[in-house]
Image (tube, coloured by chain):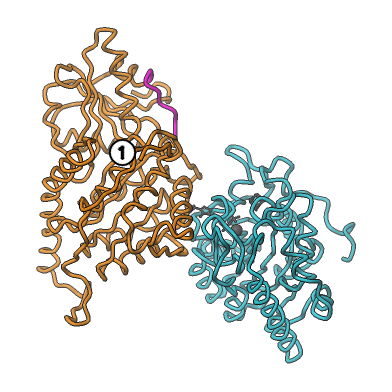
Chain colours: A cyan, B orange
Amino acid sequence: MDTIAEIPKEEYVLKCSSACAGCSDSLALRYVLKAAGPDTVLVIPACCTSVIQGIYPNTAFNVPVYNIAFGAAAACASGMSNAFRAAGKKTNVIVYAGDGGTLDIGIQAMSGAFERGTDFLYICYDNEAYGNTGMQRSGATPLGAKTTTTPTGKTDFKKDIDGIIAAHNPPYMATAAAAYPQDLFKKVQKALSFRGPSFIHVLAPCPPGWRYSTEKTVEMGKLAVKSGIWVLYEREYGKLTMGAQSKVAMKKPIPLEDYLSPQGRFKGIDPKNVEILKQRIQKNFAKLSAEEAAS
Amino acid sequence: MKKIATGNKAVAEAVKQIVPDVVAAYPITPQTEIVEQIAEFVTGGELKSRYIPVESEHSAMAACIGASITGARTFTATSSHGLLYMHEMTNWAAGARLPVVMANVNRSIGPGWNIWAEHTDALQERDTGWLQVYVSTVQEAYDATIMAFRIAEHHDVLLPVMVNLDGFVLSHLMQPLDTIEVGDFIPPLSLPHAIDTNNPAGYGGLTGTDQHFLMRWDMERSIRDSVKVIEETEKEFARRFGREYGFTENYQCDDAEVIVVAMGTLGKEMEVAVDLLRKEGVKAGSLRIRWLRPFPNLSILKGKEVVIIDRDYSFGRGGVLATEIVAQTKEDVFSVIAGLGGQEVTYDDIADFVRKRQVGKEFWFGVKDNV
Ligand SMILES: Cc1ncc(C[n+]2csc(CCOP(=O)(O)OP(=O)(O)O)c2C)c(N)n1
Ligand code: SF4
Ligand SMILES: [Mg+2]
C-alpha cells in the first residue's frame, strides 16, 4: 500500500461539499472514509464538518452521518457502538471532531468513552482553533498564534491531548497529517482493525484561520512535520513507532520560521515565543525517541 | 457618545462601561462578536476586566458563579445550545443568589443545526429564577445590559439577569448607539453573602426540606420585589440619560380594539403593522413584552381582541407567551406561531395576522391548512 493507486477510487466526500478552498478537514476526511469504507457511521459534533456536509435535505457525505451536540460526540458514539455490537454488527463508528470538540468541550465524554473501552475510532482533525465560529482560540491553539480571542497571540501552550489519550492506554493511537494522505489512510485502516477505542490526531491546516493562501495547504502540513512542530508516530499497545518523515525531521529539522512565516496568524510573533516553541520541539523529540527506544 | 454599532457590539460597549471584575465566556454563533469584542478590549487594555476563555458554557457559568461569590461583578454571554449547556449552572447561579449578568443572543435549538433567531432557548430558562428582559434595538441592548447590573445587584433582588437580543436580526444589525458614562448610576457591588475567610461559612451544602422550601420562597419573594427595583431603575435611567423603558412597550393601545403582542424585534415590526392597519381603519395597537420574568401585569389587554406572536413553542401546549397571557387575562386570543428557525416575518405578515385573526385558534405561519 505504498502508492496512491492502491487507495480505493470510491468517493465518500462528494464534490458538493461547502468546505473552504484548500480545507484540510475535508481532505483528511476523504481519506478517512476511503480507508473505512461504506460500513461506517460518522458521528460529528458541532464543528466545520457540520457545515461542510451541506444543508438539509442534501448531504455531501456518502456514509450515514449523525450530527450531535458539541460536547457529546464520544458519548453518542458509545451508545451507537454498543447498540451495533449488541445487534451483532461490525459497523465502524467513527467520531470525526474538531480540536475544540475534543480538547475543550468534548474532553469529558471522550475520556469516559476511552476509559470504558468503547469499540470506536475517535479522529480529531486539528485546525488549532474554532473554525466554525470564525477562529477563536482553542486548547489546541499554539503559543503565539493570533485568533479572534487572542488578538495579540495566545499566551498559553497547546494542550497535550495525545499525552492525555496515552494515559488512557488505548490499544492504538496515532498522529497524522492531512498533508500525508497515504500515511493517514494506513493509520485509519490499522485503527479500525483493533477492538476497543482508538485515536488519531490529524493536523489539518486551515487557510482562512491560519491566514495563508489556499494552494499552500499541503505544503503547510509538510512544513509542520519537517520543522518538528508536528510529529508523526503511532502507539500500538503502548509501543511507540515514530514515522519516517519525523525521524528525518528529528535529525535535521528545517527552521521553524519556514513554517511560521507563511502564516498570518504568527505575524509579529515575539521572538522569545519562537525560541520557546523551538525548545519544546526538541524536548518533545527527546521524549518520544526515548519512549521509542524503551518500548 | 454617538456611534454606529451592531447589537453585539452594543452589549460589548455596555460591558466596557460597566467594567465587570470577571468575564467568562465561550463563543457561539451569533453571540461570537460579543466575546471577540470583549477579548479585544481586554487585550488592548481598554477594559480592565479579567477575561477567562473557558472551554464550555457550563464552565463559563460555573466560573461566573465562582467569581461572583467572592463579591466580584461578573458577566457572560451565550446563545442557543450554549445556554442549554449552561442550564445546570444557570439554576445554580439563581439559587445561590448571585447577580450574574448575561447577554443571550436568541437562536433556535437543534437538531438540525440552525443558527437563526428564535426565543425557545431563553424560554427554556424561564423557571430558573433568572430575570429576563427582551430588547428590540441596538440602543436598548446597550441600555438594558447596563441596567441589568443595577437590578441584579440590588439587595432586594440578588438574582441573575439575562438580556435577550434576537440572533442576527438584532445581534448583527447596525443602528445608531448613544453610549453613556454610568457614573454612580451603578453603585459599587456589595454582596451580603460574599465568601469571607474571616467569617467562614458553608455554601450550597446539604439542605433539609424546610430550609430548601424557605429558600425557594425567598427567591420568589425577591423576584416579586424586583418589579419595584426594575421600575425605579428604569425611571432613574430615564432621569439621568433621557431614555424611557417599561415592562412593556405599548404603541397605539389606548383606543385599540385589537392588540398584537410579541417580544424582541418582532415587537418593533408590529408598530409598522399597526400604522398600516390604522390607515385601513382597523383600530389596532401593539404591545411588546420587554420583561418576561418578572411577568408584567397585562390588564391593558382586558376586553380587547388579542393577537399573540410566539417565536417559540412549548410542544403539546402552545406558544409560551400565549399560554402565559391567557393564564393571566383568562380571555381567548389568536395565537400565531411565527419566525421559528429565523423564518422571515414582515410587518405586512403581521398586519395580515391581525386582519385574518381567529380568536380562540392557533395558527402556524407558513404551514398550509393549519388553523
Ligand atoms: C454548547 C455549544 N457551545 C458552542 C457552540 C458553538 N460552536 C459550534 S462549532 C464551535 C467550534 C468548533 O471548533 P472545533 O471543534 O475546533 O472544530 P472546527 O470548527 O475548527 O472544525 C463552536 C464554538 C455549540 N454549537 N454548542
Ligand atoms: S474554516 Fe478551515 S477547517 Fe473550516 S471549512 Fe474552512 S478551511 Fe476547512
Ligand atoms: Mg478546530
Task: Assess disc 1: are there few (<14), some (14-19) or many (≥20) residues with their C-alpha within 10 Å of its C-alpha.
Answer: many
Residue B147, how many percent across, how many down? Answer: 24, 47
Residue B345 magenta-highlighted: yes
Q: Residue at x 48, y 69 (%)?
A: A108
The residue lying toward the viewer, choosing from B231 and A287, is B231
Q: Secondary structure at mark 1?
A: helix
Q: Which residues are magenta?
A: B342-349
Determine the chain carrying the residue at label 1: B
Say whether residue A36 is left or right of residue B186: right
The residue lying toward the viewer, choosing from B206 and B83, is B83
Q: Which residue is disc 1 drawn over?
A: B140
Residue A7, how many percent across, how many down? Answer: 84, 58
**Which residue sits furthest bottom?**
A294
User: How many discs appear?
Assistant: 1
Relative to A174, say whether A68 is above or below.
Answer: above
Residue B158, how many percent across, how many down? Answer: 18, 58
Q: Is mark 1 within 8 Å of ligand 1?
A: no
Say whether residue A174 is left or right of residue A216: left
The residue lying toward the viewer, choosing from A211 and A192, is A211
Residue A163, how many percent across, how many down? Answer: 61, 78
Say whether residue B210 is left or right of residue B314: left
User: Can you say which quadrant of the picture contains the C terminus of chain B?
Assistant: top left
